[in-house]
Image (spheres, rainbow, N blue to C red):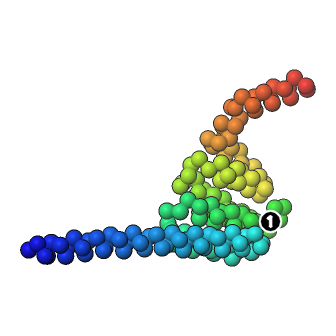
Amino acid sequence: MKLSKTRVVIALAILVVSTSGCSLVNRIRAKNQLNEAARAYHDGHFEEAEQYSRRALELDPNSKTAPLFIARTIHAQYKPGVQAPENIAKANEAIQAYQLVLQRDPKSDEAYKAIAYLYGATKDDEKLRSWISSCRFFSSVFSSPEYLRMVSAKSVKS
């Protein structure tokens, strides 16, 4: 009986080590994919960088970095000032990707700013106003002592 309990304990130990090892291997692979994404992004190959970033997220679904990389690479494919429907669609895709970033990390100032930028760049003033008025990030900026001093200094000069 002791022998079978020992075998069960050994089998469980092997199972625990092997499953934790898989997640470690996947995290390492995901990091490699993100490194490739950064390289492609730096070289201006934004679609390729997006694919590397998506693969990294598949390998490590808990990654905080991969969703932000995805959003950035989509954002980089948007061409400011071009009002072609496919370009506006790319901006909207980037907005959705940044919103996914905010679901994982509600404190991501980069995502808040990027969404505001994209709404402004696509001349979607209604969504921009709505976004700014509903966002924690912008309400904290507009109520900060620095902003209030700046606004009051400008109004005194006028």
In this view, the residue farthest toward the left is: 1
- Which element carries disc 1, helix, strand or loop? loop
Task: Give coordinates of residue 44: x percent, y percent.
Answer: 77, 72
> Is 137 or 81 nearer to us in this picture?
137
Q: Is residue 43 visible?
A: yes
> Residue visible at 81% across and 25% down?
152
Q: Which residue is mark 1?
A: 79
The quarter in which the N terminus is drawn is bottom left
> Residue visible at 74% across and 65% down?
76
Q: Is residue 119 visible?
A: no
Task: Give coordinates of residue 150: x percent, y percent.
Answer: 81, 30
Task: Give coordinates of residue 154: x percent, y percent.
Answer: 86, 29
55 vs 111: above or below: below
Quadrant of res 13: bottom left
> Residue visible at 72% across and 28% down?
145
Looking at the rendered structure, the kind of residue marked 1 is Lys
Quadrant of res 7: bottom left
> Residue visible at 24% across and 73% down?
10
Task: Give coordinates of residue 43: x percent, y percent.
Answer: 77, 73
Quadrant of res 15: bottom left
Q: Is residue 36 left or right of residue 154?
A: left
66 vs 155: above or below: below
> Is 32 or 46 nearer to us in this picture?
32
> Is 88 or 95 nearer to us in this picture?
95
In this view, the residue farthest toward the right is: 158
The quarter in which the C terminus is drawn is top right
